[in-house]
Image: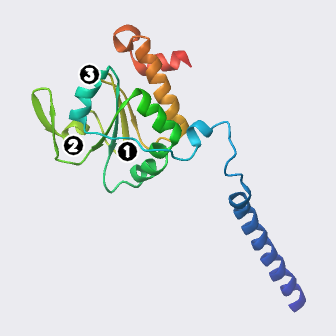
Amino acid sequence: MTAQRGVLLGGLATLAIGAAILVAAPAFSADKGAKTEDSKVQGPSVGKVSWSRLDHAMSVASQAGKPILVSVYADWCGYCKLMERTTWANSGIVGQISEGWVPVRLNGESSEPLKLGGATISERQWAVGNGVQGFPATFLLDSKGKPFAGVPGYIEAPQMARLLQDAQAYLKAGGPAVVGDFYDWAEKRN
């Protein structure tokens, strides 16, 4: 019985060591400089998103004719922090945003005032008024500040890249006035 027990324990130890090697091997053997099919949206960060306040972004977007991307977060939100470290730090996403969007970070629980048009509302009021029920949330607004898409939850870089590409194409096609609802348009397009 002792010999069988020794063989069993030895086999388990070998299995555990083998599993540890299999799990760790990709981290040590991956070619860090290798380009992949998704490297544009999965690559390392090169630069950062230059976030601004919504009230400032509204005037910049109007003058530049660019749409606005709003990232709604909460200080305590783990997925918001994860999105900051991954999606918003991704070089492909940073490039897409800097080329075609006016980026905004908005704390959905903040009482910080925003001057929008002739009214003053808090960041929290803006979030609630646009249907935010959880964090993170991402909103796309046209250059006049009118929301045309809202996506709840964490979004990975490849999905964000697709969302931003689709939104740019939607706006070039005429936006809500010409092609109607963004989600209906995107579904028909894909």
Quarter of the figure with residue 105 = top left
| Amino acid at pointer 3 | Ser
Q: CA distance from mark 3 to mark 1?
A: 25 Å
Q: CA distance from mark 1 to mark 2?
A: 13 Å
Q: Which label lies toward us, 3 or 1?
A: 3
According to the picture, the residue beneath numbered tag 3 turns out to be: 62
Disc 1 element: loop
Q: Residue 154's spot in the image, x, y percent?
A: 45, 44
The figure's colour scheme reads: rainbow
According to the picture, the residue beneath numbered tag 1 turns out to be: 136
- In the picture shown, does residue 139 fall above or below 48? above
| Amino acid at pointer 2 | Arg
Q: Could you tell me which quadrant the N terminus lies in?
A: bottom right
Q: Which mark is residue 124?
A: 2
- In the picture shown, does residue 77 fall above or below 94? below
Q: Residue 180's spot in the image, x, y percent?
A: 38, 12
Q: Residue 140's spot in the image, x, y percent?
A: 36, 29
